[in-house]
Amino acid sequence: MDARTDRDLWLSEDRDDAPAFGTLFDRHHQAVHLYCFRLTGSWTVAEELLTETFLQAWRRRTELTPADASALPVLLHLATVRVQRRRRMVPTQRSASARSAPRDGEDVMRGVLRRIAHVKGRHREILELHAFGGLSDEEIADVIGIQVTSVRWSLDRTRGPLEEPVISA
C-alpha cells in the first residue's frame, strides 16, 4: 500500500507516473462511481462517467492540483462537469439503461433527480457535490473557486427538495 497522500501521488516527480495515478484510481473509483450514479440514476451511465472522469483527470493532471491531501474533491468536480456536458449533448435522448430493467436503487435515485431537476448551473453543482459527493463547504469552495459563504448561500437556497421524503411516481 502506497503511504503517499493523494496530493503527493498527483504531484509526483514524473507527472506521467501511471502507477501513482493507478493508486489514485484504486483509492477513489468506488466513491466516484457512486457519485456518478447519484448524478444520473443509472449504474451503466455511471460506469461510463467513471471512465471519462479518470481519463479527464489523467489528461489534465498538469493543470489541476488537489488543494489538500485528498484528490477526491477534484475528481468529483470533474465528474460533475462530465455529467453536465452529457446533459447538454443529449437532453432528450433516453439512455440504454433507461430502456432496460432498472438495477438496484435506480428508480429511487431517478426520483431524487426529478425533484432537483429545476436546480440549474452552479447551484446544481454545489448541491450535487455536497449532497451526493459528501464534500464540505470548504472543499466545494476550493474546487470551484468561490467563497465559502457563496457555497453556504447556494446550499440554503437549493437544499429544500432533498430534505423532503422521496415520493414514488
Image (cartoon, rainbow, N blue to C red):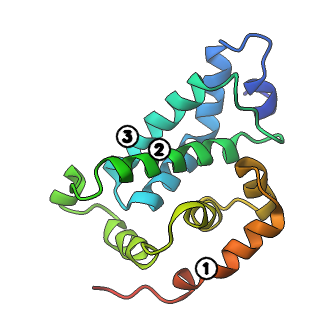
**Would residue 147 be seen by someone viewing this image from the given angle?**
yes
Indicate left or right for 55 with 169 as reference.
right
Q: Are marks 3 and 2 in contact (CB under 8 Å)?
A: no
Callout 1: helix, strand or loop? loop
In the image, residue 77 lies at what x, y percent?
Answer: 61, 47
Q: Amino acid at mark 2?
A: Arg
- Residue 60, quarter of picture: top right
Residue at the (44%, 75%) spot, across then down: 118
**Of residues 79 and 12, the one drawn nearer to the viewer in this rendering:** 79
Callout 3: helix, strand or loop? helix
Q: Amino acid at mark 1?
A: Arg
Residue 82's tag is 2
Q: Quick one: quadrant of the C terminus?
A: bottom left
Identify the mark nearer the N-term, 3 or 1: 3
Residue at the (35%, 70%) spot, across then down: 110
Residue at the (66%, 25%) spot, across then down: 61
Q: Quick one: quadrant of the N terminus?
A: top right
- Residue 41, quarter of picture: bottom left
- Residue beneath disc 1: 159
In the image, residue 54 lies at what x, y percent?
Answer: 53, 32
**Of residues 96 and 119, the one drawn nearer to the viewer in this rendering:** 119
**Of residues 6 and 57, the one drawn nearer to the viewer in this rendering:** 57
Q: Residues within 10 Å of mark 1 (few under 14, many from 20)?
A: some
Q: Residues within 10 Å of mark 3 (few under 14, many from 20)?
A: few
